[in-house]
Image (cartoon, coloured by chain):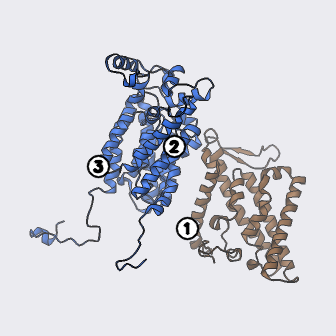
Amino acid sequence: MKVPSPSAAAPDATLLPVLFLGLCPAIAVTARVVDAVWMSAGVILVLALSGLAMSLLSGQGDSGPTVRWLRALVITALLTASLEAALVAFAPVASAALGIYAPLIAVNCLVLGVVSPGSLPASPPRSLLAGLARGAQFAVALVFIALIREALGAGTITLFRIGAFTGTIVITGIIERPARALGAAGGGLLCLGYLAGAFRAVAPRAGVKSSSPEKAE
Amino acid sequence: MPDRETRGGAAPLSLMPAPHLGVGMSTVRMTWLVSLSLLPAAAWGVFLFGSPALIVLAFSIGAAAAAELAATLPFGRFTLRDGSAVLTGCIVGLLMPPGVPAWVPAAASAFGILVVKQTFGGLGRNWMNPAMGGVVFALLSWPGLLSQWIAPRGGAGEAAALPPLEVLRAALSSSGSTGGTPLAILARAGYPFSDLDAQVLGWINAHLPAPLGTALQPGTFDVLAGHVAGGIGTVSAPLLMLGAWFLLSRGIVRWHLPVLYVGTFGVLTAVFGGLGTGQGLLAGGPGFHLLSGSIVLGAFFAAPDPVTSPLTDRGRCIFGIGLGGLTFFLRFFGSLGDGVAASIVLGNCAAPLLDRWTSRRIIGDAHGRAV
C-alpha cells in the first residue's frame, strides 16, 4: 500500500470520516459540543484564508511543488498562530475550550488538503469558497460526533451562554446515568467509525466521490 | 425428501465439496451446549439471590435476543436460532451483580450484540468477545451501579452483601490491615461468614486430619461453595467447573487456553500476591483469588470463544498465559472490576497477531521448491 500524498487526497470530498485525518484534535475536542464548534470555526477560518492567500501568491516567483508546500506551511502556521493569539486576547473562553489543540488547527488545515499544491484552485474567490466548503464538511463531522458523545456520555449539550440561557441543555433521563464510556476517547473513535461507515454507505448512492487511503496513490 | 436412488434401496451418492470428515459438532450445537453448561451456575445464582437475579438474567438475555433481531431481521436474516445471542446475554447476566438495575445488563447485552458483534458482520466476524465487550462498556459507564450486591440466602444479614474480594481490597487499601492470608484479613475485617460455614469447618477441623497441620480458616467453606455475595453466575466455582468439565469432555473447549490462563494467574498470585498483604513472596494464597471473581467463568466460557481466540494450539497457549498475566496485574493493580473482562477484551486484540505468528509456514511445494 502506498502512502497517499496530500495532493492525491485533496480532491476527495472525504475528510475526517473517511481518510481519518486530523484524528487527534478531533477526538480531543468532541467531548463537548461547544469545543467542537470552536475548533470548527478555527479550521473554517484558517482554511478559507490560507486557500485565498495561496491563490493570490500562486503567480509569484518560483511555483514548483516544494516551494508551494513551504509556502502553504508558512501561511497556515502564520494564520493559526495569529488566530491563537487573537483568541487568547479577545476570546479567552474559546482559547480555554481549544486548549493545547489550538495549534493543531494548522495540522488539520494542511492535511485537509485545501492548501496542498494539487488542489490549488485557480481563482481567489474559488479558493476562498473551497476552503469554506471543506471546513464546513469537517465541522459537520466534528459537531455530529460531539453531539452524540456529549449527549449520551454526559447527558448534556453544551453551547454558548446567551442572556438567560446558561449554555447547557440538560437531557433528563440520561444525565442521571450517562454512559461515560461514550464520553471517553474510545467513544469518540466509536462514533467516528459509525460516521465513516454511514458515509461509505451513503456516498456512492449520492454520487459523492470517495476513496479510501488504499486507493489514493 | 428422499431421491430416486434412495427410495430404490441403493446407497445414495453424495457429491459435495471438502471437508469430507466432520467432527459431528456444528457451531449452533456448540453454542447451545455452552449455554447449557452454564445452567448449574445460573440456577445456583438464582437460588442464592432470588428474584432480582432472575430479573437481571431475563433482561440481559432478552435484550441480547432483541438486539440480534433488530440487527438482522431488516436484512432478511434470522440468526437467533444459532444461540450466540442467547449465550452472550447469558454470560453478561451471570457476570452482573444481582442488585444492578435491570437496564444495565440490558444495555451491556445490546452493546455487545449491536456494536461488538453485528457491526463487524455478525457471528464469526467479530474480533472481540461480545459479552466481555458489553460488560467492559458497562464497567466503564456505570461503575457504581455494578457494585450493587445482595446478601446470599442464608447469609449473615445485610453485612454479608459485599463480595469477599471487594472487602479484601478495601481492607488492603486501608493501612494496618495487611498481614495474613486473604481469609485471615477478611476475618480480621469482620467479614460475616455464615453459620453453615462455621458448622462445616468446625466438624472438619474436629474430625479430619488438618491439611499441613493447620486448621481450615473461617470462610473456606463459604468461598469454596459459593455461598457469598458476588456476581450471579460467578460465585460458585465448583458449579462452573462442572460446566467446564462438560465442555472439555465434549471437545468443545480445548484445555490449553483455560488451563494456562488459570495456571498463570494462580502462579503469579502465589508468588507475588502476598506482597500486597504483607506476607512476602510465595505466600499469595492463590486459592482465594481463583475462587473469587469471575476468572473461572472467563477462562472456560469466554476466553476460549473460537471466534475471538487464536486458532493454533501454540497461539492458544500464549493467549492463555498472556490473559493470566493481564488478569493478575489488573486485579492487583487496576480498578476495572476483577480484571477478567478487561483482560479478555485486551487479549482479543492480540489474537489475530498470535494467529499470524504461530500459524505453520509453507516452506516448499511437492518438488522441494520454496514458495
Q: Chain of mark 1?
A: A
Judged from the image, the secondary structure of the residue bearing numbered disc 2 is helix
Provide the secondary structure element on which disc 3 rests. Answer: loop
Residue A12 to residue B120: above or below: below
Quick check: can you spot residue B89? Answer: no
Residue at position x 31%, y 53% from top?
B29
Q: Amino acid at mark 3?
A: Arg
Q: CA distance from mark 2 to mark 3?
A: 27 Å
Q: Residues within 10 Å of mark 1 (few under 14, many from 20)?
A: few
Amino acid type, mark 2: Thr
Q: Which residue is denoted by mark 3 in the rendering?
A: B250
Q: Nearer the viewer, residue A198 or B124?
A: B124
Q: Quick one: which chain is brown? A: A
3D distance between C-alphas at marks 3 and 1: 43 Å
x and y percentages locating residue B160 in the rendered image? 48, 23
Is B328 drawn above or below residue B251 in the view shown? above
Name the residue: 36% across, 22% down.
B210
Rendered location of residue A78, percent (x, y): 86, 66
Residue B62 relative to residue A75: left or right: left
